[in-house]
Image: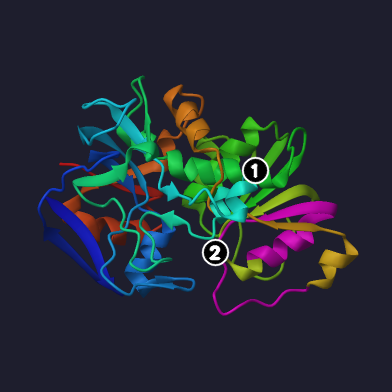
Amino acid sequence: MLQCSIHGAEDLRIEDVPCPQPGPDQALVKMGAAGICGSDMHYFRHGQIGKFKIQEPLIPGHEASGVIAALGANVTGLDEGQRVAINPSHPCGECSRCREGRENLCDSMFFLGSASVFPHAQGMFREYFLISAKQCIPVSKQVSLEELALSEPLSVGLHAVNRAGNLCGKRVLISGSGTIGCMVLLAAKLDGAEQVTMVDVLEEPLAIARKVGADQTLCVKPSAVPSPELTNEFDVAFEVSGAASALGNCIELVRRGGTIVQVGTLPVEGIHLFANQIMVKELDIRGSMRFGNVFSRAVRLLENQRLNVKPILTGRFPIAEAAKALQLAFDKTVSMKVQIVAD
């Protein structure tokens, strides 16, 4: 079987390896679709994301769906041939954060496709992969495997909205209209947001944001100065782009007593902010890391066709063309969510 691995910056290799067999409590899954995330792109381009550096060959990919190919001993609730979404998050369940119900902050998190631990948590850009049966969420309705693979980014959006608190009737700003920005948009609308404004430096992702429900979109120049067109004060702002200037703009644009949720990964070297505004306006700034216990909800929302995610899907490539797929994913003028799919 073929698998894709990253050995360092710009060093991606397609390898032919033996197909594994499931052990007790495991499932062997034939990959259906696996989305390319910003973290996968960072690993490919830079050999790291934030402080997480590749120290051994890393198989990327943490947004995946597939079909059960074989089951190990003791597995119940799954059948061969069943379609599943894969939850890439495997918390320990024992640390203080897990006991608080904040599993996404687990002290010993094992998150697939990540160099955050060593040996690395290998991901799912491969034709077949082994996974704990508990991480497989089966579906019975006829949602496509490509849509089902969006369960993970949708979970990120749902978690970010949960971090913001009740959005019913509120005016929301989302800075960055890529895949996660659009997922935050869908989750905010689901939570009752009255108006959602999307901001980006490119028109193409904003066009997709309009298709999935943005009330207002604005293309701005990269700048530390808020656009004069954004005159309304927002109740809640989600910074998703990871741009330092965008966080500064959110601080300026949110109303007094408002809330900012930081979702994007900011530069590892740090940023400069006019932080006194946080005090003067008495702002709440909250982080949002991956996702908590919302994955099953994301799967059911997609399974039941509650959300229109099809406009987000803009490309699909076989594993053998993974490098081409990653290069396309970098070009936000022609792509949003590019996926690796089984041949």
Picture quadrant of residue 224? bottom right
**Residue 116 visible, this orientation:** yes
Label 1 crowding class (10 Å Cα cut-off): few <14, some 14-19, many 20+? many
Q: Residue at x 39, y 61 (%)?
A: 114
Rendered-image quadrant of the C terminus: top left
Residue 331 placement (x, y as % from top left)? 37, 59
Q: Quadrant of residue 149?
A: top left
Q: Please give the residue where the numbered disc 1 appears in the rendered image.
A: 161
Q: Is residue 160 above or below residue 324?
A: above
Give the magenta part as a residue range.
Answer: 246-274
Residue type, mark 2 in image: Thr
**Earlier sequence position, callout 1 versus callout 2:** 1
Please give the residue where the numbered disc 2 appears in the rendered image. 265
**Looking at the picture, how far across and down is residue 236, in whole percent?**
74, 48
253 sits to left or right of 279: left
Judge from the rendering whether residue 102 lies leftward or rightward of residue 304; answer left or right.
Answer: right
Q: Amino acid at mark 1?
A: Val
Residue at the extreme top: 141
Q: Secondary structure at mark 2?
A: loop
